[in-house]
Amino acid sequence: MKGYLILLISLLIAGCAGQNVSTTEQDTPKAVQAYNTLGMQYLRRADTSNAKLAFQRSIELDAKSAQAYNGLAMVFQLEKDTELAESYFKKAIKVEPDSAMLHNNYGAFLFSLERYAQACKELARATEDPFYSQRSQAFENLGRCYRLIDRLDAAEHAFKRSLTLKPDRPLAILQLASVLIEKDNHEEAANLFDRFSKMVDEKRVQHNAQSLWLGVQISRLKNSSIDAATYGLILKNMYPDSEEYRQYKESTP
């Protein structure tokens, strides 16, 4: 039934964009959810015009549809209209102030604008819900945010919480290892890099600029000049324009 409702609404939106859908024979909450689902489908295809229409129809039926406000926020974020995007994120959170998903989305938006202090506050709110399905991701995002405002202890805690919830998050592993190097905890950093390297060997992930630069640093700490040079050469060949390669060049005699 839900799939049929989404299809019906999709056809109505495509065929009569200027008209309202009658809900006299519809279950309104189901119609609202169908419009929201349809809006997200359009958004994934970057069809922002139809996504807006679907979310607006949802709000016409339910002015307290946090999902619709969140959807419009993401639409305007995609369209680079940051003021409108932020206003709709705030509307969504006003409707559902305890939603971890909404705080995570708004925090990620603020992070993209380099408003890190504000982003950290929103991301921290997202981690508070123990039942949030993306809680590990939220802790990882929070750790990255704390790093950028030089709160290394808080970043370390956030990355460790992320890995407690989901041990094989490659980005959290690399970020935590980098934090631990900055804090002179070289042994634990090396152990984390070994975990990541095992994932590479198992073809579960691939090296990137960050992991290669980390490999250089770990190898130097182990006095393994050959491994350091190897990681450095791969970094040069694969990511010659990266910030990590610039750091490598500056650190090489």
Image: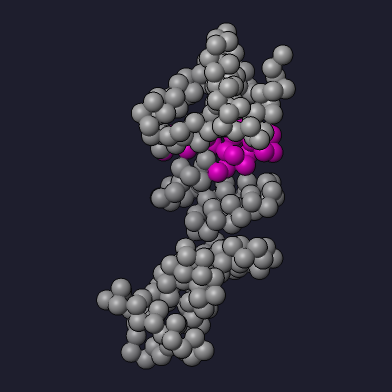
Q: Quadrant of the C terminus?
A: top right
Q: Residue at point 34% right, 85% down?
A: 26
Q: Quadrant of the N terminus?
A: bottom left
Residue nearest the viewer, comparing 29 with 214: 214
Residue furthest left in the image: 1
Above or below, 170 relative to 136: above
Residue nearest the viewer, comparing 53 with 247: 247
Residue 40 percent coordinates (x, y): 46, 67
Do we see residue 27 in this rendering? yes
Horizontal side of 217 relative to 62 (left or right) equals right
Q: Residue at point 52% right, 40% down?
A: 140
Residue 225 percent coordinates (x, y): 58, 10
Q: Which residues make up the magenta segment? A: 141-165
Q: Residue at point 38% right, 34% down?
A: 204
Residue furthest front in the image: 237
Residue 135 percent coordinates (x, y): 46, 46
Q: Residue at point 38% right, 32% down?
A: 203
Above or below, 138 relative to 205: below
